[in-house]
Image: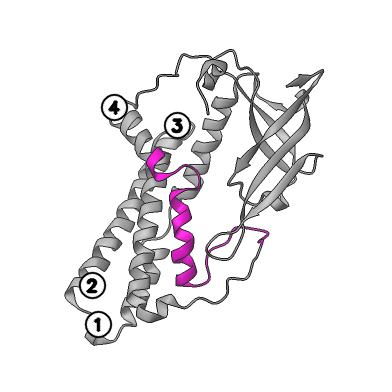
Amino acid sequence: MKDGDEWIVNGQKVWTTLAHISKWGLLVVRTDADVPKHSGLTAYVVDMEAPGVEVRPLRQMTGEAEFNEVYFTDVRIPDSERLGAPGDGWRVSLTTLMNERVSIGGTIVPRGSGPIAQAVKLWKNLPEERKDASTKDELMKLWIDAEVLRLTNIRASQNRKMGSPGPEGSTGKLAHAEANKRIYAFCVDLMGADGMLYGTYDMVRPDHVEGADTVQKAFLRSRANSIEGGTSEVMRNILGERMLGLPGDVRVDREVAWKDVPRN
């Protein structure tokens, strides 16, 4: 609701990384209910310390709470803090998300480094009687997956030099998330009973996002890779529609004003 040169915002946002230490946030709000859903959004920079902004921790299965949910209760945001034109919030969101997905899944690491390096190290330290052909074959499949992802990201980075990130960022993010989950699941299997050991589940609200210091923690944290920055299901839709040219999902509310869309 607009009041003079300010917007009064009420709502909730789930999964906001490090919101508990953030001074500023990017907020997309509905400013026009008389147009279809994607057309009535506007992006604003919001002061995370403003009255009415409440940040609540979301505790993960690692014990940490790097994610948060944020509640907005009659928060006043000056229109001067608008990012882009009125109604241009969806474009701002897409630009932000595409760059986020590249930052998550588009990193070009040295060959054989990262999660797959941990898997290889665990394999090398196994007793000889456990180094069976089936397990070695699984390790090599994962190594190939990691290398294909690395080479694909190199090719995608060359394309990005010509402009903003496109759907290739979603492809890399999807591959990265699924590869990480498979590799760390394999690592925990290699560890046997030791894979069930975990240091502490003490509640921690970190001041930055950092890599896990144990394989067990990395295994648990890797589950978030397929959620943050857009779920793997959303990434598959983008891949199918924008890269493979497959028909999109049926969207009966595409041209319907937001106020007329049935909601519970």
Q: Could you give the CA–CA distance between mark 2 and mark 3, rounded to whole angstroms?
A: 42 Å
Circles 3 and 1 in contact, beta carbons < 8 Å: no
Circles 1 and 2 in contact, beta carbons < 8 Å: yes
Q: Which residues are magenta?
A: 205-234
Which residue is labeled 2 in the image? 135
Q: Hey, what amino acid is under mark 1?
A: Arg
Whether residue 210 is in magenta: the answer is yes
Which residue is labeled 1 in the image? 130
**x then y, percent, for residue 99:** 52, 39
Pick out the residue farthest to the front.
264
Viewer-side label of 4, 3: 4
- Residue occupying the point 35% across, 63% down: 183
Q: Hey, what amino acid is under mark 2?
A: Thr
Whether residue 137 is in magenta: the answer is no
**How many numbered badges does the structure rendering display?**
4
Q: Quadrant of residue 135?
A: bottom left
Q: Could you give the CA–CA distance between mark 1 and mark 4, rounded to whole angstroms?
A: 46 Å
Q: Secondary structure at mark 1?
A: helix
Residue 245's disc number = 4
Q: Quadrant of residue 258?
A: top right
Mark 1 or mark 4: whose residue is earlier in sequence: 1
Q: Hey, what amino acid is under mark 4?
A: Gly
- Residue occupying the point 38% across, 80% down: 193
Q: Could you give the CA–CA distance between mark 4 and mark 2, rounded to whole angstroms?
A: 38 Å
Mark 4 or mark 3: whose residue is earlier in sequence: 3
Which residue is labeled 3 in the image? 162
Near mark 2 (Cα within 10 A), the count class, few <14, some 14-19 or many ≥20, is: some
Mark 4 or mark 2: whose residue is earlier in sequence: 2
Mark 3 or mark 1: whose residue is earlier in sequence: 1
